[in-house]
Amino acid sequence: MTRVNLLDFDSAALAAWVESIGEKPFRARQLLRSIHRRGAQDFDSMSDLAKSLRAKLSEHAHVTTPAVLNDSVSDDGTRKWLLDVGQSNAIETVFIPEDDRATLCISTQAGCAVNCSFCSTGRQGFARNLTTAEIVGQLWMAEHALRAGADEVDRVISNVVLMGMGEPLQNYDAVLPALRLMLDDNAYGLSRRRVTLSTSGMVPLIDRLAADCPVALAVSLHASNDALRDDLVPLNRKYPLRQLLAACRRYVKVAPRDFVTFEYVMLDGVNDSDTQAAELAALVHDVPCKLNLIPFNPFPQSGLQRSSPQRIRAFAHHLMDAGLIVTTRKTRGDDIDAACGQLAGDIRDRTRLNERAARKTIPITASVH
Ligand code: SAH
Ligand code: SF4
């Protein structure tokens, strides 16, 4: 019998597994609390469990997160972990502390198949889906690293956003149990409003999410018409704007927040004109929404530039004049390449990084610049 990783199980799956090894289902609750709330990894430390059960657990199960290849802290407090998910694939997890919240940005795939032209993850291509253990393991690892060893403290992370590498709705089966764990009072106990899934627009799965586990939804719009969006977000050719916006309207009816957040990356001379602002305002006028303008984070060979601050301000004002709620994202973690779309660097860097990691010269501890 192969040992299972208990981070792969949400509460229902854990109860079923616990029963399958001949134990009472209520043990699942104890286990869940030990693993996710206390951050226990070693069954011997779970003193509320009988010794015989601890021995059985060690025989059949383990609690394993992806190994940390690098851990760096930015001048602004943003902290980024580079995690090894095997076969030369690395993913990133970013912690963003703010005055009123502390957000963890997690990855759902190694690479991404959607291939948006402004995204360095997309440019790397798709490697593989992460498992539930690798997705929720990022939260487990970060929460307990940030607690700095303290066992029973209040949670450090108040919000989770699925905005790292990958398209979460293209890895639905692994993402769903991870979301359920984030919301579970015996695990991370986050409210639905504080867990945000960001999607480039997998229309049928937006509806499934609404039925299975409605969390806050962000939709990467980036364009005011289909012709431009076909170019920037190739998935648009499959699910064009009319279908996407209809799915957003349906989602809002069950969403924990009464709006959808539209993300709009500001690309100089591509999608940032006054005419496009007017077109965008007309496009979303009947969807309860907020717009989040994201200054483009350049990366080598993208061939794209960030819109100027003046242009972003003018674009935002046009939208506000049309009655929309608009925010502009602050760029964080620039000095450690933790800003949106800079995750994991380019493939060559990644390969070099893995070569170095294999020779164990990678710094494993935090390096504060
Ligand atoms: N795949 C999902 C979630 C991950 S991307 C999605 O596309 O929504 C998270 C956000 O970062 C998206 O809004 C994406 O468009 C944005 N993004 C990607 N590359 C970027 C870049 N180079 N600069 C700024 N934002 C970027
Ligand atoms: Fe994938 Fe999102 Fe990047 Fe597009 S923006 S390539 S969907 S990770």
Image (tube, helix red, strand yellow):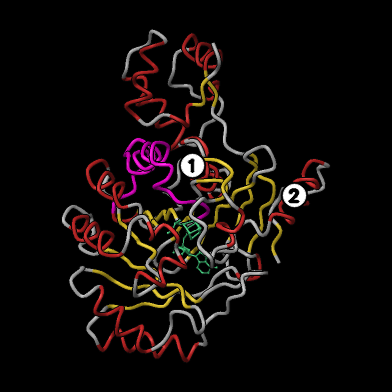
Note whether 309 is above or below 342 in the view shown.
below
Left or right: 207 with respect to 276? left
Image: magenta residue range: 164-192
| Distance from mark 2 CB to nearest ligand 2 atom below 8 Å | no
| Picture residue at 65% right of the left edge, 65% below the top | 336
x, y percentage for residue 219? 35, 62
| Picture residue at 55% right of the left edge, 80% below the top | 306
Note whether 281 is above or below 198 in the view shown.
below
Q: Residues within 10 Å of mark 1 (few under 14, many from 20)?
A: many
| Picture residue at 55% right of the left edge, 15% below the top | 2
- Mark 2 lies on residue: 351
Note whether 71 is above or below 242 in the view shown.
above
Q: Which is nearer the eye, 204 or 329?
A: 204
Q: Quadrant of the C terminus?
A: bottom right
Find residue 16 and report its image quarter.
top left
State the mark number for residue 283: none
